[in-house]
Amino acid sequence: MATTSSCSNPSINGSSPITRIAQDHLFSILLLLPLDSIFCFAMTCKKFRSLTYSDPFWESLCRRDWGQSSIDALRSFATDSNKQQQFPWKKLYQQIYQLDSVYCNRILTTHPQGGDEELLLPRPRASHSLNFVSGCLVLFGGGCEGGKHLDDTWVAYVGNDFRRILKWNKIESGIPSGRFGHSCVVIGDCLVLFGGINDHGARQNDTWVGQVAVHDTFVITLSWWLLDVGSIAPPPRGAHAACSIDKRRMLIQGGIGLNGLRLGDTWVLELSENLHLGVWQEIVTHPSPPSRSGHTLTHVGGNQTILFGGRGLGYEVLNDVWLFDTSEGHWRWVQLLFDLQNIPQGLALPRVGHSANLIIGGRLLIHGGEDSYRHRKDDFWVLDIGLVTSIMQSGTPADPERLKTKLWRRLKSKGDNPGGRSFHRACVDPSGRNFYIFGGMVDGLLQPAESSGLRFDGELFLVELAIQC
């Protein structure tokens, strides 16, 4: 369609039939197009330019690309912050697309009741679990100094009016048993926990469900029950990776099994509607990711999940990216090939014990971890999921120059950088713009009585994407 100053075309009324389509129908058509095509469409005439640059259209585009939950959370954030409810959606979309930095803040803690009693806080730890569910941060287990496991559960209500001051509350339950290197994912308002290792080195393969409830008085309860999975379950393991892939299913991959053997198997757990029964199924495909531990699995929307990094069979630290796809009625693993030399600062990418979370804008945010020399990292990287999936769908080799500029990007860190750490845990809130980091192994000062400078951290950090809304 040629570029003109008006939508004129020979027809009965002197205009193109497309101009008579209702605005909501035009929105629906435009939202089927990639961003570049939308801009080309906007150049055809003044009317379409006005339409595609309007705030309602960009709100619809943000909803398409980020999801309704992110939009609702952003609106709630603006309302609670006494800001205008009408967002500059186009500007916000551009900021997310061009994201280049994050702001880090050390979170303060206060007494559960605001009194003078001794302040109780979670002990420093690593290889624990940290999840955001029902407006709360939930922390469970992990390992601490002396190689001991922990069995404590802590919750802190965040909600929409969070002001960087947190109240940790300890939940006394006694279950699940103490462990580290387990996985814990969010399904609805519940947590699903699998496996882990205790301080005797025993690997486990039990599955637990925990339901979080926030009551009117902001009292938080957490109820755990052992999931009935019948006679079939994955072999015992720890240091595996897991994520939820829809409202009723959890995916796990790899880990360290019996006798310290690294595993490469893939399993899916399907839960019943009441979350009291579950069925495990092993997924066997070729190709599939090599055996590993300390890696991450992140569901990135739709039918797709990303696996990244970890430590392989030969104790090497990995930087490979795999896509797990459940579309078209079958399961498959597909590897994304790229050259570290073609990515700015890409040689720093291989890592184990990092965190990976999906943030607003459909990007995978990766933080920390350690390399093959156990050097702990304090960097932040984003992986462009849109480019990953388009490469997979095309089935053709990626252009190295395109990968260099778009696939990976290292972000600048401002404020209180959490510092180098590995085997920490991180989670993101429903808006996708606030990222919480707790614990991990960090480099400490060497003491005469210590053989190494390793220590465990017990601080909580809030990492915010550098955007304004």
Image (cartoon, helix red, strand yellow):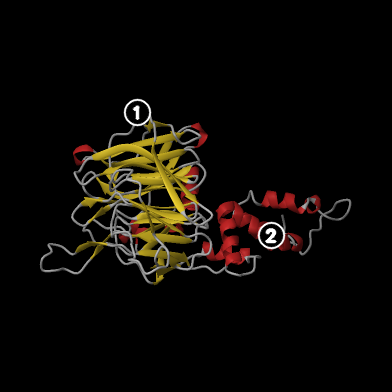
Q: Is residue 6 visible?
A: yes
Looking at this view, is 241 or 142 the one in front? 142
Looking at this view, is 107 or 292 the one in front? 107
Mark 1 is on which residue type? Ile
Number of numbered discs present?
A: 2
Real-space Cα distance between discs 1 and 2?
A: 50 Å
Left or right: residue 418 versus residue 391 is left
Residue positioned most to the top: 231
Percent of width and height locating residue 394? 50, 44
Q: Nearer the viewer, mark 1 or mark 2?
A: 1
Q: Quadrant of the N terminus?
A: bottom right
Q: Which mark is residue 45?
A: none
Q: Quadrant of the C terminus?
A: bottom right
The quadrant holding residue 256 is top left
Q: Is residue 405 visible?
A: no
Q: Mark 2 — residue?
A: 56
Q: Secondary structure at mark 1?
A: loop
Q: Which mark is residue 232?
A: 1
Percent of width and height locating residue 451? 12, 62
The quadrant holding residue 411 is bottom left
**For the point 50% across and 43% down, which residue is it?**
393
Q: Secondary structure at mark 2?
A: helix
